[in-house]
Image: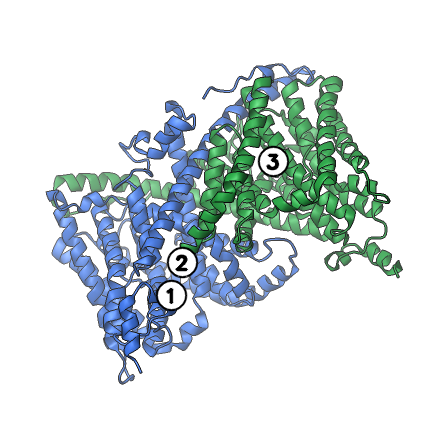
Chain colours: A blue, B green
Amino acid sequence: MQLPSLTWLMQLPGWGNTYLLASATESATEASSEAEYGTLLLTAVLLSLVVIYLASKLGGEFSNRVGLPPVLGELVGGVLVGVSALHLLAFPEAGVEPSSSLIIRFLESTGGLTPDLAGAVFRDQNDVISVLAEIGVVILLFEIGLESNLKELLDVGIQATLVAVVGVAVPFAAGTAGLMVFFGISAVPAIFAGAALTATSIGITSKVLSELGRLNSKEGQIILGAAVIDDVLGIIVLAVVASLAKTGEIDVTNVVYLILSASGFLIGAILLGKVFNKTFVSVVDLFKTRGGIVIPAIIFAYAMAYLAAVIHLEAILGAFAAGLVLDETDKRKELQRQVIPIADILVPIFFVTVGAKTDLGVLNPANPTNREGLLIASFLIAIAIVGKVVTGLAVFGQPGINRLAIGVGMIPRGEVGLVFAGVGSASGALSKPLEAAIIMMVILTTFLAPPLLRFVFPDSEPAVESAEAVPELDRAANRQP
Amino acid sequence: MQLPSLTWLMQLPGWGNTYLLASATESATEASSEAEYGTLLLTAVLLSLVVIYLASKLGGEFSNRVGLPPVLGELVGGVLVGVSALHLLAFPEAGVEPSSSLIIRFLESTGGLTPDLAGAVFRDQNDVISVLAEIGVVILLFEIGLESNLKELLDVGIQATLVAVVGVAVPFAAGTAGLMVFFGISAVPAIFAGAALTATSIGITSKVLSELGRLNSKEGQIILGAAVIDDVLGIIVLAVVASLAKTGEIDVTNVVYLILSASGFLIGAILLGKVFNKTFVSVVDLFKTRGGIVIPAIIFAYAMAYLAAVIHLEAILGAFAAGLVLDETDKRKELQRQVIPIADILVPIFFVTVGAKTDLGVLNPANPTNREGLLIASFLIAIAIVGKVVTGLAVFGQPGINRLAIGVGMIPRGEVGLVFAGVGSASGALSKPLEAAIIMMVILTTFLAPPLLRFVFPDSEPAVESAEAVPELDRAANRQP
């Protein structure tokens, strides 16, 4: 592709004076090569997004088809197109050539990308995709906030809270201590990995429970309530740990400050939110043009995300608080309905890039330097399962309740676990083997939860949508009176 | 804000071998400063988006409140926050310091942005916002394609086609010739400006007609049909003109090639689409997970946009063709419903940045060097009005039809006119005064159309939603039996 000939720009007889002539030709020449570059960058981003969406949709659908949560497939889809396998998506790092990205090479052969521009397009396209992925996780946590009902959270009460607290404390303490004692890992990475063991995935848990027709059982209610509280705790833990990672050492004053500011931010947002709610609804009622609900909500979410980031918490904590606040408004249903398609196109960018950036090569047992990483992964997985199964023992005053089922229901990690891996890796707190071990833990707990839950709920009636995928449950259901 | 202390990274006693130690510390140090930078970039983008959404919503609502189309207010909102006024959004260009962006200065004082990183954040944030704006216009044209019904387009038939063709040919010919003859502007910029005079805004026209309760009158039907065809013609003209601007000279073979490839691309997409429709619907029917309709549709739209860009047409042409194709499917309604919120959060980025990048200073009559630009603007506005009013004369065999109303109904330019201004400016075809003159023309035709339409439809019954904004029409309606 040749550069545009600019001869016509050099002769603008109509612009009779030197000032305009000079500024017009100068800025036009510049604008022209900028536009050329802009088109290249746009095509690179469009192509990356097509690859990301294909990986997320095919992975998600396949995963769903075999009875596993779609998010797992999106992650695996990302691994397949990323640096571990197909190299369609590659990311600029020390020693990584632009040509290691198949998309860049494809653009060089079809899209007129010249080798001297390849480096800039590679870097800028990665900036755009990375920011889109971060906006994706902001939107995801905003949506989780919208889905988390504060009142329900308080209604399921003490049982769910106990399960949640035990389910955060045990894996965190056992994980962190184990990594430090048995593996000699220093405090900050050990705390980060321990923290990544805490948060149960609401999405995955509720999906699996609904597939088993157990969403409204007593066990299901406790699991769901605990998963909600768990998620909030996990986010506070994440904010604390991520800030810890940033300052680089364990400073008790700092920890207290962070716990206070994280809790204060969330509680303050919720309290102020009760006032803000009415303002939001009355402002939105004034709006008559398109996007009258979703744009003010997004402004609020992004502003809260900005605020949280600026006071050294995480942007996602702000977005989650914004979601919790807006959850209380009359506009919630309409807002949720409109946020879904936005989340659908932004959230997969996060999961697929997390997968694509993960170099599973570090877990290859054929390489002797990897063996310690694999050992860590096995240890994390054991703690992840045992640490949640014991939560069932915390339930009291509920005779005949299936304690094992509650514990098993808390096993799947997911979105938030991956957020830990992503944030931890980005902040430099996690070494690559440790990050890969966390991702292995997330993948495996997510893989194991559905069959384990079927095992501990032997008399489950499958919901219609899972009947096809889980034929053995049909038979189980048929055995019932 | 201090850079994170990385001492803890230097001592990972657990990683007993040099290989892992070296790679972990090296990549962690790098990842940490990358994450620091990533957070800064994310906060800059979030803050810019908050400003963009505030400008678009407040501008759009105000515009709607005073009875004008919201898109006009989004553009004016962009002008207010952009380089012409508040300087909240500024864009990297020769001689523009990062500190000219108030957002960058705000981040320096609150967000821990250091002056040495300000330049990089300023540039990268602009890359992200520019790509988002371009994705916004891709989504806009995809949505316009989804809204444009090919069958209806064929049903309103010859009258609408005649009006559309006259309404493209007259302003284009008169505009281009006038600019070359009276103002001595060379061919390519003159053709670009002439082309920007062609496309009637479907959105604005249909909105105004519905506000006047005239959407289903004979005149209304012809105007709407013509506006649809007009939009397609305008997009072909845009593709031809933009490619012309890229190759830099008027090459008849190239023009014919471009007209053929543009038409071929659209017609081919539509014909292939008849087959693809069934495939799309059956693939979408297989999908059970979230985003099952919208993700495949977006994959198709982005892939078509990529394809169009690669064969030297415009990305938006591909997105429009994708919309026309998917318009024919049974899934259209559900797809349209889901695309609306996505468009709501992406499209305003385009309009606001178009406004924000427009330096209205070049149209300040106090500066003598600007006077020729203002003269051009006046000329373009005259041609824009007269060139569309004459289209009413092309209607035949419809006794008693309000020819003037049809002509006036075609006056408002809008989305596509602004797309011309944006693409033209980005491709270097338009000097800044010429671009500003086009934007003035779009703003003024949009401003003038609603009052003019009320004037030529004196007995209009206002629709309920406009009753408040247009009190005098209440009285007109009350005069009717």
Depth check: give the residue in front, B446 or A397.
Answer: B446
Residue B128 horizontal/vertical position (percent): 47, 39
Q: Is residue A450 visible?
A: yes
Q: Are marks 2 and 3 on the same chain?
A: yes
Letter of the chain that mark 2 sits on in the rendering:
B
- Mark 1 secondary-structure assignment: helix
Marks 2 and 3, Cα distance to the nearest angstrom? 37 Å
Residue indicated by mark 3: B419
- Mark 3 secondary-structure assignment: helix
Query: Within 10 angstroms of label 1, few (less than 14), some, or many (20 or more) residues?
Result: few
Residue indicated by mark 1: A465
Marks 3 and 1, Cα distance to the nearest angstrom? 45 Å
Letter of the chain that mark 3 sits on in the rendering:
B
The reply to whether dot 3 and dot 1 touch (C-beta < 8 Å) is no
- Mark 2 secondary-structure assignment: loop
Q: How many marks?
A: 3
The residue under the point 62% across, 63% down is A282
> Is residue B344 depicted above or below A170 in this figure?
above
Quarter placement of the N terminus of chain B: top left
Residue indicated by mark 2: B288
Marks 1 and 2, Cα distance to the nearest angstrom? 9 Å
Q: Amino acid at mark 1?
A: Glu
